[in-house]
Amino acid sequence: MPISIVIGGQYGSEGKGKVTHYFAKKYKAAAVIRVGGPNSGHTVINDKGEALIFKHLPTSCIVGGIKSVLPSGHYINLEILEHEIEVSGINDSDLIIDPYAVIISKDDIDKEANSGLIEKIGSTGCGLGSAISKRINRNAKTIFAKDIGGLKKYVSDSNLYLRNLLNQNERVIIEGTQGFGLSLLHSNLYPYSTSRDTTAAGFLSESGLSPMDVDDVIMVIRAFPIRVAGNSGPLKNETTWEDISARSGSEVLFNEFTSVSKKLRRVANFDEEIVKRAIQYNKPTKIVLNHVDYIDIHSQCSRTLNAKVKSFLSEVEIKIKMSIDYIGNSREDILEKMVFEKGIEKFLQVAN
């Protein structure tokens, strides 16, 4: 089994964490790779019903028997990683860190805090961009995982390990970060972007693996796209959480805060253009649509799709010219879409 890549089709926070967690179990993946750095937090629900947010470890780290891999294209905040190792309870043998993964220094964080990027483009200020810049400039102050004594028990050649898995026909999943609309290279909203390419090809490059191994690209989108708070860039069809909540029939206000900066997210009505561009650049084999309860609150705990949600799904499929393969909401795990067999509508709940 080759490689699956999970990507975001909008501006991030589409629910890639729970999607990766689900497919890691469904495919019985041998390893999950997390690329990028701590400017993106992915949420997953553990067996106790607790929401855990990971900025470094892949969300599958709470599943026994699946290796977590931080490749050379990963940028590490040591304090955050140490906390996640403790919270996840991951075994030492289940975490592999490439020797050339880069360490984000305090100087990197301070440099971004003083750069004005937080105010100018809504940067998280976590130091990732500074660390990438330092690496590109071949700065002698660049620190790698191999230079940190406390990481020694985790450090080994991630490419060699992953290649051996692929040669044994094992499934490997890459958990991408953020969304296509934030790509440094391919977003048409520059400079309102992140410091990396956020396409499937970019994630694959950061993992150090071959395009010849990829057979599955899973694009995750949401019913109402978001951007981070502040001057984070254009957001077509922007609306309010009050408007979305009222239209959904919810008596409780929907609102979301970023898992990294803890700021209230901006939100908008569905925009097919950003998704169509993401499809054009990534050619996904599957599409997951999350947050359908924002369309109708009654779908949150229901095991059937009502007319309002079905109508929205049909409209989205027509607009993006692709089928939605899986759906999910803001609370529960991924649900398979309605499937049709001999004219009989069946609704299948995916096992947790």
Image (spheres, helix red, strand yellow):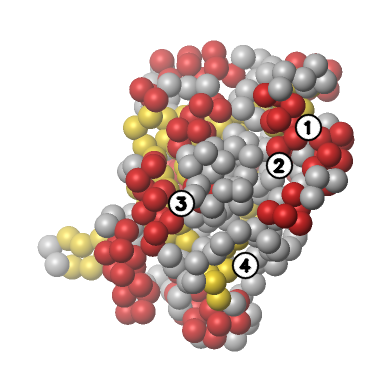
Q: What crowding class fits label 2: few (fewer than 14 Cα within 10 Å), some (14-19), or many (20 or more)?
A: many
CA neighbours of label 3 inside 10 A, class few (<14), some (14 to 19), many (20+): many
Q: Which mark is residue 266?
A: 4
The reply to whether the C-beta atoms of the residues labelled 1 and 2 are less than 8 Å apart is yes
CA–CA distance in space, label 1 to label 4: 28 Å
Q: Quadrant of residue 97?
A: top right
Nearer-N-terminus badge (1/3)? 3
What kind of residue is marked 4? Answer: Arg
Q: Which residue is mark 2?
A: 38
Distance CA(mark 3)–CA(mark 2):
20 Å
Q: Callout 2, which amino acid?
A: Pro
Mark nearer the N terminus (1 vs 4): 1
Judge whether residue 185 can be spotted in this image.
yes
Horizontal relation, residue 169 to residue 165: left or right: left
Q: Are marks 4 and 3 in contact (CB under 8 Å)?
A: no
- Residue type at tag 1: Ile
| Separation (CA) of disc 1 from disc 3 | 27 Å
The quarter of the picture where residue 145 lies is: top right
**Numbered tag placed on residue 104 in the rendering:** 1
Picture coordinates of residue 238, whole percent (x, y): 54, 72
x, y percentage for residue 251? 59, 86
Q: Which numbered disc flags the more N-terminal residue, 4 or 3?
A: 3
| Element marked by disc 4 | strand
The mark nearer the N terminus, 3 or 2, is 3
For the residue carrying disc 4, how many other residues have a C-alpha within 10 Å: few (<14), some (14-19), or many (20+)? Answer: many
Q: Residue 125: percent from the left, percent from the top?
A: 77, 47
What is the three-letter code of the residue carrying label 3? Gly
